[in-house]
Image (cartoon, coloured by chain):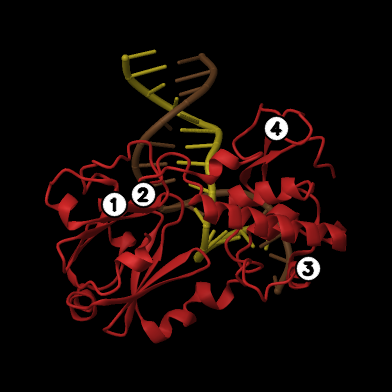
Chain colours: A red, B brown, C yellow
DNA sequence: CACTTGACCTGTCCGC
DNA sequence: TGCGGACAGGTCAAGT
């Protein structure tokens, strides 16, 4: 059970936060439009999560790399012996995570107390993520949403659209281009490496040198990788915990990412790690040639 | 406008 | 053992 099933209908009783950059709204707005409001809906667009409130405001949340939302049920919040269904984590996992974690901990940035005695913790070790309270009608107008590209898994998104959108970045390498969220949403460093390996494209290949069949294959591989990741519950390779207490992970299925010095699953060549577009990049030197 | 690099952060790991 | 530096990766600002 995800947050979209757990949160709607619950009220916000109180909000506490200690790191201004994690929750930059003015205190009076929080008091007026957040505290006392009820959650109506949880949505996602690109890598951004939105929690709609009946005050006509929306909590817009970006977890970045280390952000995590942890829902803790009434039982757990009251210190009773927890079961798996009492805690739901959404986002990056951390080595210390466990079902009996004491929360808040030192990475807790925001605490939401909810109307049924449950709590929602926004944890973010590196403080890159944020929570913003924005009028619901203005959410589509924030800079990120005005610029971000299409959802790669939507039915309307075709390989021809990917090809056309890539033309804006034709003089850069393909890895930088597919990491660019204004070209297509939702492809981060892990899925970029996995999709490029799947399509047998070297990450430093210039976009303008890619053929239509290559772009079509990359499109197919990117969609397959993203869908597999959703099916496996994300990529947090440590301790992702879903409602059943399962800790499955896409990273168990990664074929090149963080697999340097291991054999390529397709040809056996040793996978290497380099830096492309400022990011750690994993490639098979046999399958992926310039 | 296109493109690249550095900044934002903390925790971990590696070499000396 | 301690210590400095590199690294992790999403986005934005500032640079060329």
Look at discs 4 and 2 and give the one toward the viewer: 2
Residue A42 figure quarter: bottom left
* Neighbour tally class for label 1: few under 14, some 14-19, many 20 plus, Cα within 10 Å: some
The residue to which callout 3 is attached is A163
Q: Residue at x 46, y 66 (%)?
A: A48
* Neighbour tally class for label 4: few under 14, some 14-19, many 20 plus, Cα within 10 Å: some
Front-most of C4 and A144?
A144
Q: Which mark is residue A266?
A: none
Q: If you read the primary sequence from the N terminus, does the residue marked by circle 3 or circle 1 appear first?
A: 1
Q: Are circles 2 and 3 on residues that touch, CB within 8 Å?
A: no
Look at discs 2 and 3 and give the one toward the viewer: 2
Q: Secondary structure at mark 3?
A: helix
Give coordinates of residue A21: x percent, y percent.
33, 61
Residue C15 figure quarter: bottom right
Front-most of A9 and A174?
A9
Q: If you read the primary sequence from the N terminus, does the residue marked by circle 4 or circle 2 appear first?
A: 2
Q: Residue at x 45, y 56 (%)?
A: A64
Q: Which mark is residue A85?
A: 1
For the N terminus of chain A, the image quarter is: bottom left
Q: Which mark is residue A272?
A: 4
Q: Are marks 3 and 4 on the same chain?
A: yes
Q: Are circles 1 and 4 on residues that touch, CB within 8 Å?
A: no
Give coordinates of residue A161: x percent, y percent.
74, 73
The residue to which callout 2 is attached is A244
Q: If you read the primary sequence from the N terminus, does the residue marked by circle 3 or circle 4 appear first?
A: 3
């Amino acid at each position: 059970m995800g947050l979209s099933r757990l949160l709607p209908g619950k009220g916000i009783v109180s909000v506490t936060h200690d790191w201004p950059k994690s929750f930059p709204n003015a205190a009076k707005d929080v008091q007026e439009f957040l505290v006392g409001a009820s959650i109506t809906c949880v949505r996602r667009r690109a890598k951004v999560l939105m929690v709609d409130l009946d005050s006509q405001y929306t909590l817009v949340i970006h977890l970045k790399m280390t952000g995590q939302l942890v829902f803790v049920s009434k039982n757990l919040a009251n210190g009773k012996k927890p079961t798996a269904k009492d805690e739901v984590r959404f986002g990056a996992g951390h080595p210390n995570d466990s079902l009996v974690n004491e929360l808040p901990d030192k990475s807790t940035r925001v605490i939401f107390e909810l109307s049924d005695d449950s709590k929602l913790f926004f944890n973010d070790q590196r403080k890159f993520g944020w929570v913003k309270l924005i009028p619901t009608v203005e959410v589509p107008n924030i800079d990120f949403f005005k610029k971000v590209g299409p959802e790669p898994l939507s039915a309307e998104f075709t390989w021809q659209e990917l090809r056309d959108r890539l033309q804006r970045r034709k003089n850069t390498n393909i890895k930088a281009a597919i990491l660019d969220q204004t070209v297509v949403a939702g492809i981060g460093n892990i899925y970029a490496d996995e999709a490029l390996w799947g399509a047998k494209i070297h990450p430093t290949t210039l976009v303008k040198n890619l053929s239509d069949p290559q772009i079509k294959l990359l499109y197919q591989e990117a969609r397959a990788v993203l869908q597999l990741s959703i099916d496996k519950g994300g990529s947090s390779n440590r301790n992702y915990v879903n409602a059943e207490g399962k800790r499955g992970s896409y990273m168990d299925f990664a074929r090149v990412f963080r697999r340097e010095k291991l054999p390529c699953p397709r040809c056996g060549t040793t996978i290497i790690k380099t830096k492309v577009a400022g990011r750690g990049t994993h490639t098979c030197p046999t399958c992926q040639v310039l």
